[in-house]
């Protein structure tokens, strides 16, 4: 079956696929279609299967993924395969590539108007940074809830700036 690339028949005998189908394991997890040679039981340094221990070649290495149900449509698997050129183990590595469309707002906390009000912002006895012994301070706010940083007005020539209702 392996030489004939008969993945459909091999998949029908795969234990993980059968257990997932019966909802015994990995419920709500997804896996792309396995359309590559079994990845386990190779003779190290080769692409030949080791039949010495009477073990059937199998897909022991898998890539499974899960998302919130509302995000399932935003994840598309582009590739799912194994890499036969890496032969340092009796397993050959498996890889997958995905396209994930992300949204700015968090799915658990949908985007909404956000108001943060700071009513008494001040600096006291700041270090001078200008030649005149004063500074021109401002405050910049960062946060992943902001689309871009927010900056206060610059207070000229002072070491004790106060921003009120600005």
Image (spheres, rainbow, N blue to C red):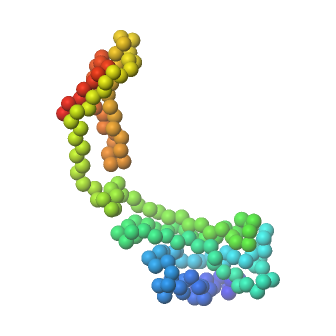
* Pick the front one: 54 or 164: 164
- Give the residue drawn at x 28%, y 56%: 111
Observer able to see residue 37:
no
**In which image quadrant can residue 89 be found?**
bottom right
Observer able to see residue 115:
yes
Give residue 119's position: percent from left, percent from top: 21, 36
Give residue 128's position: percent from left, percent from top: 38, 17
* Pick the front one: 135 or 41: 135
View extreme (top): residue? 132
Give residue 91's position: percent from left, percent from top: 70, 72
Considering only vertical position in the picture, is 152 above or below 157?
below
Give residue 126's position: percent from left, percent from top: 35, 22
Which quadrant is the C terminus positioned in?
top left
Considering only vertical position in the picture, is 57 above or below 117?
below
Which quadrant is the N terminus positioned in?
bottom right
How many numbered marks, from 0 up?
Answer: 0
Q: Is residue 41 left or right of residue 94?
A: right
View extreme (left): residue? 165
- Give the residue drawn at x 30%, y 17%: 157
**In which image quadrant can residue 154 be found?**
top left
View extreme (right): residue? 52
- Give the residue drawn at x 36%, y 13%: 133
Considering only vertical position in the picture, is 150 above or below 127?
below
- Give the residue drawn at x 75%, y 75%: 42
**In which image quadrant can residue 55 be found?**
bottom right
């Amino acid at each position: 079956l392996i030489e004939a690339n008969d993945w459909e028949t091999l998949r029908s005998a795969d234990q993980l696929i059968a257990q997932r189908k019966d909802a015994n394991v990995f419920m709500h997890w997804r896996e792309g279609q396995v359309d590559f040679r079994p990845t386990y039981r190779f003779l190290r340094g080769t692409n030949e299967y080791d039949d010495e221990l009477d073990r059937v070649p199998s897909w022991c290495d898998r890539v499974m993924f899960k998302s919130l149900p509302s995000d399932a449509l935003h994840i598309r698997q582009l590739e799912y395969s194994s890499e036969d050129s890496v032969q340092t183990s009796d397993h050959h590595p498996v890889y997958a590539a995905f396209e994930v469309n992300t949204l700015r707002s968090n799915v658990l906390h949908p985007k909404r108007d956000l108001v943060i009000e700071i009513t008494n912002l001040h600096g006291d006895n700041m270090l001078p940074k200008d030649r005149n012994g004063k500074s021109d301070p401002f405050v910049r706010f960062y946060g992943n809830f902001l689309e871009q940083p927010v900056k206060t007005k610059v207070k000229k020539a002072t070491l004790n700036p106060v921003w009120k209702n600005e």
